[in-house]
Image: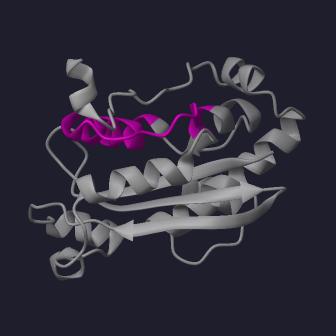
Amino acid sequence: MNFIALDLETTGTLPYVDHIVEIAAVLFKSNEVSEVFQTLVNPKMEISPEATRINGITNQMVQSQPVIEEVLESFADFCSDYLIVAHNATFDFQFLKSAIEKYKSKAPLGEVLDTYSLAKKALPGLSNYKLGTLVKHLKIEHNTLHRAEQDARCCGQLFQKIINQLRTTNVKQLVQFSGKSALKFPQVYHAHPQLQLL
């Protein structure tokens, strides 16, 4: 099964107040990492010490990085129409949706599934379903959690273990099993806005 595993790092937890500081999307093809899209993002606001403690990203690190509106189109092109998975997917989705709507940017076309909801159903009885807990429980190899690319890689491996256990790659079945609707990014981008006037 081919899919994208996604993770963001942000300045805080409020999608219409805080901003993205890192995006990583990891393309899995035939159970292997095929390609990676990763970039730091200048949030145009101060990163709080608390956020830096969590993800290790400082104000100095993002100072010369592109702003989100310069990143969204290449991110959308990379994701194309692949299925996207993320852990606590609503969090990442809301941040990206906010930016896509604000800048009327190109957006990924694929549905977004939540590995947190899937893991709760596929692996009942764990003390919690944080990514770190699941990575440890399933013996997924990792370096440091809480940077976007590493977390995305771990999320992708988690998804592979879930679909192996459920013995299905059918997206409709996975959505039903998760108990949550798949998310879809708004398609508000117009390549040639002047044509809309005709």
Towards the viewer: 110 or 169: 110
Q: Among all residues in the image, which is located at the extreme front?
A: 198
Q: Residue at x 60, y 38 (%)?
A: 81
Q: Where residue 184 sits in the image (x, y, percent)?
A: 48, 27
Q: Residue at x 55, y 48 (%)?
A: 79
Towards the viewer: 3 or 10: 3
Q: Is residue 77 above or below residue 41?
A: above
Classify the position of the N terminus by image quarter. Answer: top right
Q: Residue at x 54, y 54 (%)?
A: 78
Q: Where residue 152 sits in the image (x, y, percent)?
A: 56, 59
Q: Quadrant of residue 138?
A: bottom right
Residue 20 in sight in this render? no
Q: Residue at x 58, y 39 (%)?
A: 116
Residue 124 in sight in this render? yes
Span colored in magenta: 90-117
Q: Where residue 60 sits in the image (x, y, percent)?
A: 17, 82
Numbered disc total: 0
Q: Among all residues in the image, which is located at the extreme left?
A: 45
Main secondary structure found in the magenta portion: helix
**Residue 2 covered by magenta stretch:** no
Q: Is residue 19 above or below residue 169?
A: below
Q: Quadrant of residue 164?
A: top right
In the shown orientation, is residue 96 left or right of residue 76? left
In the shown orientation, is residue 100 left or right of residue 197? right
Q: Is residue 17 above or below residue 47?
A: above
Towards the viewer: 117 or 77: 77
Q: Among all residues in the image, which is located at the extreme right?
A: 167
In the shown orientation, is residue 148 left or right of residue 133? left
Classify the position of the C terminus by image quarter. Answer: top left
Towards the viewer: 189 or 133: 189
Q: Is residue 18 above or below residue 88?
A: below
